[in-house]
Structure formats: C-alpha cells, structure tokens
Amino acid sequence: MKLAIFGANGSAGTQITQEALSRGHEVTAIVRDLSRFSMTSDRLTVVVGNVCDADSVAAIVQGHDAVINAAGPGAAIANNATLAPMVIDAAKALIEGLTRADVRRLIVVGGAGSLEVAPGVQLVDTPDFPAQYRPASLAHRDSLKIYQASHLDWTFFSPAAEFEPGERIGKFRLGRNQLLVDTEGRSRTSVEDYAIAFVDEVEQPQFVQSQMTIAY
C-alpha cells in the first residue's frame, strides 16, 4: 500500500512508520522539520507538510491508499494548553484535504481520555485524571466528534491509559470505546505493540467509522 503519515517523527509516528516499512509498504512521511527526521528507506519519501492546512493535506495525500494522522502536541501539552486546539484543526483539515484528494481511508492516533470507564463516563471526566493532560484529552474527544460526522472511512485508535515506549510483545487485546484493563486494573500497552495493531488495521480494516483501543 501507499501510505501518507503525518507526524512521522513523533513517538507513535516513528513506530508506525517503521512497522509499515517493515511490511513492505511505500510510505510518505510528512513532518514539520526535515532536520528532526533521520529514518531512511528506499520505500520512504520524506516531505514537509502541515496537517492543519487543508491545501497542504490535499496536495500531499493525492494518490495514496490511506492516510495516518500521528501528529499532535505531544509532551509540550503539559506546559502549554494553547497547543491542544491543533488536534481539532487537524481533524478539520484532514477531512477537507482527503475529500479534495479523493482519499477515503483515514486512521488517527487518538487519546485514551475519550474511552468509557463506565456506561456514559469517559476516562477524562474521572476525578483522578491528571489535570495537565486534560486539555489534550478534551481536544482529542472533540476531534473524535468531528471524525464521526464525516463521510470518510475513518478509524480513531485510542491507546491504553499507560502508553509509553517499551517491549514489542506482539500479544494484546483490542476493543472499541471502552477502556481495557488487566487483572490488576491497569490499562497499558507499549508504543511498539500499538504500532503492530495500527498497521494491522491499515491492512485489514475491522473498525471502519469507529473508535478502537488496545491494551494487554
């Protein structure tokens, strides 16, 4: 497949890009700063683009089979809540840009905050949810509503609550919009295993026009 990946130099984006390349896919990595991206492959093209600009999106994704949005404010959100709206701006630009380019498939790296922990209760609304991550989580939740109203074949892939680089185990559980926890009550997965499940969904879609999640 020919895949376009926004935010290919982020934590999730890097692993998804590597996973896609390892499976033989052709990847266009879209970054804001070429100097911060060092990955190389004969199946990899690296370009500068802006996921929040529909013109940039449309021009870059033309001719691709699927688009992946792994762009986000990242760790900076803890210190700068003004970055959170970029998640919403990106959703709007992606929908418009993909529509113009006649590309229907979109898979998004979402947030865990919009997952339900009880009927009608989302993780971001629980009392113990860390305050510094609330702006980003609320922005991701709002962006999910934007994708839900679109005509695209979207998937919003929310990671587990604990989501960090770690081991590539290759065994995990998948779900839809409910937070998955283990026997100890923890919701966790590594970025490496998330990338496996992510590219699986790209290759063999099971959660089209749906939220999905992962955990051990």
Image: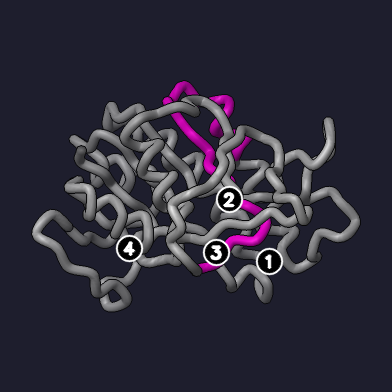
Residue 179 is left or right of residue 126, and the answer is: left
Coordinates of residue 180 in the picture (x, y in percent): 68, 44
Determine the secondary structure under disc 4: strand
The kind of secondary structure element at disc 2 is: loop
Q: CA distance from mark 1 to mark 2?
A: 21 Å
Residue extending furthest toward the left: 42
Mark nearer the viewer, 2 or 4 = 2
Query: What type is the residue that disc 1 sits on?
Result: Ala
Query: Tag on residue 27?
Result: none
Identify the residue at horizontal 71%, vertical 48% (top origin). 181
Quadrant in the picture for the N terminus: top left
Which residue is tagged 3? 73
Read off the magenta span: 144-165
Q: CA distance from mark 2 to mark 3?
A: 16 Å
The Cα–Cα distance between marks 4 and 1, rounded to whole angstroms, is: 22 Å
| Amino acid type of the residue tagged 4 in the rendering | Val
Question: Quadrant of residue 128 in the image?
Answer: bottom right
Q: Are marks 1 and 2 in contact (CB under 8 Å)?
A: no
| Residue designated by label 1 | 81
Q: Earlier in the sequence, mark 2 or mark 4?
A: 4
Q: Nearer the viewer, residue 195 or 77?
A: 195
Disc 3: CA contacts within 10 A as few (<14), some (14-19) or many (>=20)? some
Q: Evaluate whether residue 26 shows in this view.
A: yes
Name the residue that disc number 4 marks.
31
Going from the N terminus, do you reach mark 1 or mark 2 first? Answer: 1
Q: Nearer the viewer, residue 86 or 42?
A: 42
Q: Amino acid at mark 3?
A: Pro
Q: Is residue 155 magenta?
A: yes
| Crowd band around label 2 with a 10 angstrom C-alpha radius: few (<14), some (14–19), many (20+) | many
User: Which dot marks residue 159?
Assistant: 2
Q: Amino acid at mark 2?
A: Pro
Q: Quadrant of residue 2?
A: top left
